Image (spheres, grey):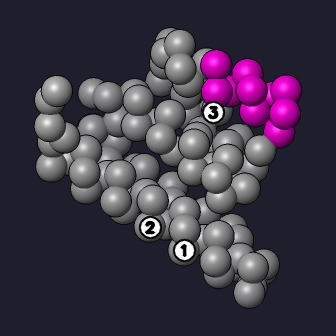
Amino acid sequence: MKGLSKKEVDFHHKVAYRFEKSYRLIKKSPEKKNQLNLDIIEVISDHSDFIEQDANALFFCLYFCIYYNNPEMVEFLKTLIKKMRVDNTEINYLLEQIELNGV
Protein backbone atom coordinates (compact mmCIF):
# COMPACT_ATOMS: atom_id res chain seq x y z
CA MET A 1 0.00 0.00 0.00
CA LYS A 2 1.48 3.31 -1.01
CA GLY A 3 1.84 6.10 1.52
CA LEU A 4 0.26 9.49 1.13
CA SER A 5 2.34 12.28 -0.33
CA LYS A 6 2.96 15.47 1.63
CA LYS A 7 0.81 17.42 -0.86
CA GLU A 8 -2.05 14.96 -0.44
CA VAL A 9 -1.93 15.07 3.36
CA ASP A 10 -1.63 18.86 3.33
CA PHE A 11 -4.64 19.25 1.04
CA HIS A 12 -6.81 16.78 2.94
CA HIS A 13 -6.05 18.39 6.30
CA LYS A 14 -6.68 21.91 5.06
CA VAL A 15 -9.91 21.14 3.21
CA ALA A 16 -11.26 19.03 6.09
CA TYR A 17 -10.51 21.83 8.54
CA ARG A 18 -12.24 24.44 6.35
CA PHE A 19 -15.37 22.33 5.89
CA GLU A 20 -15.62 21.63 9.62
CA LYS A 21 -14.97 25.27 10.51
CA SER A 22 -17.60 26.39 8.02
CA TYR A 23 -20.15 23.92 9.38
CA ARG A 24 -19.66 25.08 12.97
CA LEU A 25 -19.61 28.82 12.23
CA ILE A 26 -22.61 28.77 9.91
CA LYS A 27 -24.69 27.39 12.76
CA LYS A 28 -23.81 30.47 14.82
CA SER A 29 -23.68 33.04 12.01
CA PRO A 30 -25.51 31.95 8.83
CA GLU A 31 -24.69 35.27 7.17
CA LYS A 32 -21.02 34.20 7.00
CA LYS A 33 -21.76 31.21 4.76
CA ASN A 34 -20.55 32.80 1.52
CA GLN A 35 -17.24 33.91 3.04
CA LEU A 36 -16.66 30.53 4.63
CA ASN A 37 -17.33 28.79 1.30
CA LEU A 38 -14.86 31.18 -0.34
CA ASP A 39 -12.28 29.99 2.19
CA ILE A 40 -12.88 26.40 1.04
CA ILE A 41 -12.61 27.46 -2.60
CA GLU A 42 -9.33 29.20 -1.82
CA VAL A 43 -7.86 25.97 -0.41
CA ILE A 44 -8.99 24.11 -3.52
CA SER A 45 -7.46 26.80 -5.75
CA ASP A 46 -4.21 26.81 -3.79
CA HIS A 47 -3.90 23.08 -4.38
CA SER A 48 -5.02 23.06 -8.01
CA ASP A 49 -1.76 21.45 -9.19
CA PHE A 50 -2.34 18.53 -6.84
CA ILE A 51 -6.01 18.22 -7.84
CA GLU A 52 -5.09 18.14 -11.54
CA GLN A 53 -2.74 15.21 -10.79
CA ASP A 54 -5.21 13.38 -8.55
CA ALA A 55 -8.88 14.03 -9.30
CA ASN A 56 -9.84 11.76 -6.39
CA ALA A 57 -9.23 14.81 -4.23
CA LEU A 58 -12.52 16.11 -5.64
CA PHE A 59 -14.26 12.96 -4.39
CA PHE A 60 -12.96 13.82 -0.93
CA CYS A 61 -14.41 17.35 -1.25
CA LEU A 62 -17.78 16.00 -2.37
CA TYR A 63 -17.79 13.66 0.60
CA PHE A 64 -17.30 16.61 2.95
CA CYS A 65 -20.12 18.49 1.20
CA ILE A 66 -22.42 15.63 2.17
CA TYR A 67 -20.97 15.12 5.64
CA TYR A 68 -21.17 18.82 6.51
CA ASN A 69 -24.38 19.51 4.55
CA ASN A 70 -23.00 22.10 2.14
CA PRO A 71 -25.04 21.99 -1.11
CA GLU A 72 -23.56 25.28 -2.36
CA MET A 73 -20.10 23.74 -2.49
CA VAL A 74 -21.52 20.76 -4.38
CA GLU A 75 -22.58 23.14 -7.13
CA PHE A 76 -19.10 24.70 -7.23
CA LEU A 77 -17.48 21.26 -7.39
CA LYS A 78 -19.85 20.08 -10.16
CA THR A 79 -18.78 23.05 -12.24
CA LEU A 80 -15.11 22.41 -11.51
CA ILE A 81 -15.43 18.72 -12.40
CA LYS A 82 -17.09 19.61 -15.72
CA LYS A 83 -14.42 22.21 -16.54
CA MET A 84 -11.64 19.76 -15.72
CA ARG A 85 -13.43 17.04 -17.71
CA VAL A 86 -12.96 14.57 -14.90
CA ASP A 87 -14.22 11.12 -15.82
CA ASN A 88 -13.98 9.17 -12.58
CA THR A 89 -16.37 6.34 -11.75
CA GLU A 90 -16.48 7.06 -8.01
CA ILE A 91 -17.03 10.80 -8.52
CA ASN A 92 -19.73 10.21 -11.12
CA TYR A 93 -21.50 7.75 -8.83
CA LEU A 94 -21.37 10.15 -5.89
CA LEU A 95 -22.73 12.99 -8.03
CA GLU A 96 -25.58 10.74 -9.19
CA GLN A 97 -26.40 9.89 -5.58
CA ILE A 98 -26.40 13.57 -4.63
CA GLU A 99 -28.75 14.29 -7.53
CA LEU A 100 -31.11 11.51 -6.44
CA ASN A 101 -30.98 11.98 -2.67
CA GLY A 102 -29.68 15.50 -2.09
CA VAL A 103 -26.92 16.39 0.29
Specify the farthest residue to the bottom: 28
Element marked by disc 2: helix
Q: Which residue is mark 3?
A: 79
Residue 57's place in the image compared with 40, above or below, is: above
> Disc 3 marks which amino acid?
Thr
Identify the mark at residue 21; answer none if there is no mark: 1
Quarter of the picture containing the C terminus is top right
Crowd band around label 3 with a 10 angstrom C-alpha radius: few (<14), some (14–19), many (20+): few
- Choose the circle earlier in sequence order: 3 or 1: 1
User: What's the magenta bit mostly, secondary-structure-wise?
Assistant: helix
Residue at image location 83% in from the left, 39% down from the top: 102
Quadrant housing residue 80? top right
Q: Position of residue 82 (x, y in %)?
A: 59, 23
Count of number-bearing discs: 3
- Choose the circle earlier in sequence order: 3 or 2: 2
> Disc 2 marks which amino acid?
Tyr
Residue 41's place in the image compared with 21, above or below, is: above
Nearest to the observer: residue 15 or residue 44: 15
Specify the farthest residue to the front: 1
Circles 1 and 2: CB distance less than 8 Å?
yes
Q: Which residue is mark 2?
A: 17
Which is closer to the viewer, label 3 or label 1? 1
Element marked by disc 3: helix
